[in-house]
Amino acid sequence: MATRMPGLRECRDTACATDVLPIVSKKPNYRQKRMYACLGGGRGWLLLSFLALAPPGDLRAATAENAQSALGINLAPVTYYSSELPFLNLLHMPGQWITHADTTWDTNEEKYLDLDSDGWPRSLTAVNDPAPQQFTSVAIVVPRLDGAAGGYYPGGRYLVLYEGQGTLEYRLDASLVSRAPGRDVINVAQATSNGIELRITASDPHRTGKYLRNIRLVKAENEKALQRGEVFNPAFVALLRNFRALRFMDWLATNGSPLSSWAARPLPGNAFWGTRGGVPLEVAVQLANELSADPWLNVPHQADDDYITQMARLVHTQLRPTQNVYVELSNEVWNGSFPQYQYAVDRGRAAWPGQPGGNGGDEWNRNWYGMRTAQMCDIWKSVWGGDARRVTCVLAAHVASTYSAAQSLKCPYWAQAPCVGHHVDAVAVAPYFGWVVPAAWSSQPDGGLGALFQSLNVQNAPGVPAKGYLGQAAQWLAAYVSLLAPYKLPLLGYEGGQSFLGGGSKPGTELAIRANRDSRMHTAYTTWLGQWKAGGGQLMMLYNDVFIPGDSGSWGALESIMQTTAPVSSAPPKWAAIQQFIAANPCWWPGCAPATSSAH
């Protein structure tokens, strides 16, 4: 059968043709919903020796631990169940209050709460509730974890600091130790999967407007750091020291983002940062500054020109001058599993009604995405003016379909085509390796581990690529490097890593989790990263930092911030492989490291 690359419509179908290898679109969105796509495998492996032009000049501080790092990483979604624990104040993690009644855990009346502009309840009286009010209190639970290796979260003394008047109660893992105005001390004798429940049972009892607000839940030993204005958990910051860049796609809640106008964006003073609007942009920039890392920022797909302009201006103002920024329009707009795909189709249809839509609208999608990326790039470069070289404007594409990139780079429907001529600096793909493990493997004497690792290099089951999953990733890399050579554009990885799944099977999921904990996964990552380097890839943004494994995948380099990472030889296999690769492979593309930096 002749080799072909599937169209995007084919890659959204449940059944793929025999020469199209199915692979997951990899990551969960908010609440760990599975997203699928089909990726096509090419034939033959041509490993090219090619170095594209480097992204715009790197002004990184020579003393930073990540000064010569070749790897970046995606940060996990901010949720109440995250094992990443990034913030000193744990109350930043949830997305909303839970409304409680005496006999009902959640009355589902959150949308009727009387909240101020930052999300604090002004009272415990419902507003515009069409039915009689049920709830008598509101609460949050953090961090509610299950299945993470290394422990749930730190036990011991916590402080609850607050303004206003009212009554707070503590349940599940927490118990009250002492109380003073504006300051409660609670204790977690034994951290479990239940977490800490903080409940407001009364607020503003004298009706003077002094309702409970600005509530902070912090480990007792971190109180002074919080008072100094520090935001991030020191243990979390320490984990990220060696990464060149941080991709904030999940922190910014990019997939299906409702944001379109700058006035509606989340702000640092908001009670919760795990909302549909995502973490405030200022917080992302602050973390990048603290780590001397380059932020990789995703612009919401519905953002208007003013939003893009204000976003560029804020980052230019707040990002330290020793750092660069990567800018990408939304996330995987080519992927029909995400709402932004159809948005691009609809906008493309409206813009060019006389042009063919392609397979279900793929041509409208690719042309609109290319156009909007070009417009975004033009705006950012204009706002940054003399510092425009610090902005790397990224066009992202489907790893198994070079056509998805080529069509957006050319964008023939747009009157100002080609889009590549509008300050597009790089193309990025996500070369994952692995797929759903065959159920039969789980019944083998070793539980299927041998077969799973064999599939990295050979075709040992139907659906496994002819040269194994690592061979398939190498084919994708070679195809993209070849495509981009005439454009003189570098190839980046916006995401990457293993992507083994159980496919809904409990034994399969358990096998995938065991494989991610197996020492052979260290070898797999070392090989995969080595072929990315040898094949001409540049910055690789791993997916992701800390994530609890389960049915939706084992995405985290770590499963919990509680795991041991020092010395590196004692760390989990994926984490150890990543850190050892960084140490042994200083960034290899032109201009990526300061001339005065010392080698790792």
Image: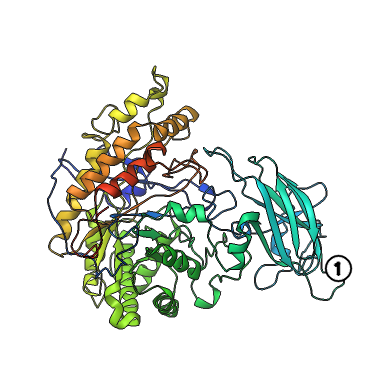
In x, y percent, where is residue 566? 43, 43
Task: Give the farthest residue toward the top.
Answer: 445
Q: Residue at x 38, y 28 (%)?
A: 438
Instruction: Look at 17% across and 64% down and name the residue there.
Output: 53
User: In this rendering, would 161 be left or right of 295?
Assistant: right
Q: Give the colouring mode of the picture.
A: rainbow
- Viewer-proximal residue among 582 and 330: 582
Q: Which residue is mark 1?
A: 205
Q: 50 or 262: which is nearer to us?
A: 50
Residue 27: x %, y % from top left: 43, 48
Determine if residue 465 is in view: yes
Q: Is residue 158 left or right of residue 64?
A: right
Q: Given the current orientation, which residue lies at the most extreme right position?
A: 206
Residue lying at 41% horizontally and 44% vertically, measured from the top left? 557
Q: Residues within 10 Å of mark 1 (few under 14, many from 20)?
A: some
Can you say which quadrant of the picture contains the N terminus? top left
| Residue 219 visible within the image | no
Q: Which quadrant of the figure has residue 445?
A: top left
Instruction: Give the x, y percent position of residue 252.
Output: 48, 62
Q: Position of residue 363 (x, y in %)?
A: 29, 62
Give the SS element for disc 1: loop
Q: How many marks are shown on the rendered structure?
A: 1
| 552 w.r.t. 86: above or below | above
The kind of residue on which mark 1 rests is: Pro
The vertical placement of 373 against 9, above or below, is below
Q: Quadrant of residue 494?
A: bottom left
Quadrant of res 191: top right
